[in-house]
Amino acid sequence: MENANLTIDLNALYKNAKYINDNTNGGLIATVKNNAYNFGLKESVETFYKAGVRNFATTSIRDAIFIRNLYKDVMILSLNPCIEFETLKEHKISCVLPTLSFLKNNLENMKDISWHLEWAGLMRRSGCTSQNELIEIIKLAKENNIKLDGIWMHFSYADEFDQNNTYEKEKELWFDILEQAIKIHKFNYIHAQNSASYARDSKFKNHTHVRIGISLYGCPPYSKCDLSNNHYGLTLSAKVVAINHLKKNESIGYSSSFIANEDTKVAIINLGYGDGLIRKRVNGFDVEINSTRYPLVSMMMSHTVAIVDDKVNVGDTVYFYSKSIPVYEFTQKGVGTNSEQISPLNYDSLDVKYIPCNY
Ligand SMILES: *Cc1c(COP(=O)(O)O)cnc(C)c1O
């Protein structure tokens, strides 16, 4: 029997990217960190490029170089500060400029590189944290002929709808800072919005770009998000390899992980946590077999178990994720974020298939 299958429809990625890129006048920076959210770096970048995308962001210098080797005419932003200045120059990789001390410490080596000044916002992962620091960076960079090409921040609350509406406050703070910054310097790249922020507000005024990840991969960033332009393209499927009949009180799996409380027909399915399915996706949640939902009750390294009925047979295809049982359904049910479910999927144990982009 064939292995479990991961199928990625690149047409969905194309449509998502084209829609956002067109609606921002070419202002899409496609976020392709972590193997393009595990959709495959090469396939994703090539598809986004086809859709007109000319800006990419990643946390990995290795991946940035890989993208540069594919295309000469794209902007590639390293989202992590990097002090391998020769590498940045050689491959024309733009880089974040996080703090005044980074600038002071590396002043001599930072010429001929494009820098994107980072505002920490409430994320406080990196970036400068006061208006004084930001203004001082701009002044010092200008005095030293350091190319300040961009200014940006990352919202920590755009995906949240908390009682205090923290996102709105975070936005106000940023707009204020940005207003001061653009008074004294002209930036070619001004970007703050991730998928959630873009879905909530569309592109902000004064901003040149949006920095989108998960929406490109067909998962809406929050539960009430409008789905009319969302194209979903990830399918994870496996096969029923055996049907077992458990008598009342019989168990199945390691440590009796499931005990039948009546006579029960179960399907053994050839996909488990070794294939990257996260444990929380299993208990209490469904799979789809022949267009019907069945509950999962147990998981092992290479197998899962579902309670089924007489319509299910050995050899039937079992869908863990597909258009009709999408990843984001389980995000909304509390299994984990979209990327937490997608990132672990194991390219070495699954049969991976790409549906080529027809555009
Ligand atoms: C991951 C990431 C994004 C994209 O976020 P999504 O919510 O997936 O759209 C944007 N900017 C930065 C800095 C990121 O790390």
Image: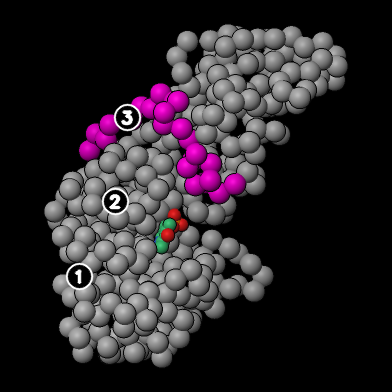
Q: Residue at x 36, y 27 (%)?
A: 353
Direction from residue 110 to residue 337 in the image, left or right: right
Direction from residue 187 to residue 133 in the image, left or right: right
Q: Quadrant of ligand 1?
A: bottom left
**Residue 350 counted in the magenta span:** yes
Direction from residue 47 to residue 245 in the image, left or right: right
Label 1 SS: loop
Quick one: label 3 or label 2, which is nearer the N terminus? Answer: 2
Please name the residue that numbered disc 1 is placed on. Answer: 113
**Residue 79 counted in the magenta span:** no
Q: Nearer the viewer, residue 314 or 22?
A: 314
Q: Nearer the viewer, residue 108 or 78?
A: 108
User: Eyeballing the image, is 9 above or below 21?
Assistant: above
- Amino acid type for the residue under numbered disc 3: Ile
Please name the residue that numbered disc 2 is placed on. Answer: 62
Q: CA distance from mark 1 to mark 2?
A: 17 Å
Q: Is mark 1 within 8 Å of ligand 1?
A: no
Per the rendered image, the range of residues in magenta is 336-359
Q: Residues within 10 Å of mark 3 (few under 14, many from 20)?
A: few
Please name the residue that numbered disc 3 is placed on. Answer: 355
Q: CA distance from mark 3 to mark 2?
A: 26 Å
Q: Quadrant of residue 234?
A: top left
- Amino acid type for the residue under numbered disc 1: Ile
Label 3 SS: strand
Q: Residues within 10 Å of mark 1 (few under 14, many from 20)?
A: many
Q: Quadrant of residue 187?
A: bottom left
Quick one: label 1 or label 3, which is nearer the N terminus? Answer: 1
Instruction: Estimate the x, y position of residue 198 in percent, counting from the top left.
Output: 42, 62
Q: Residue at x 57, y 11 (%)?
A: 241
- Amino acid type for the residue under numbered disc 2: Arg
Q: Residue at x 44, y 68 (%)?
A: 154
User: Eyeballing the image, is 29 above or below 330?
Assistant: below
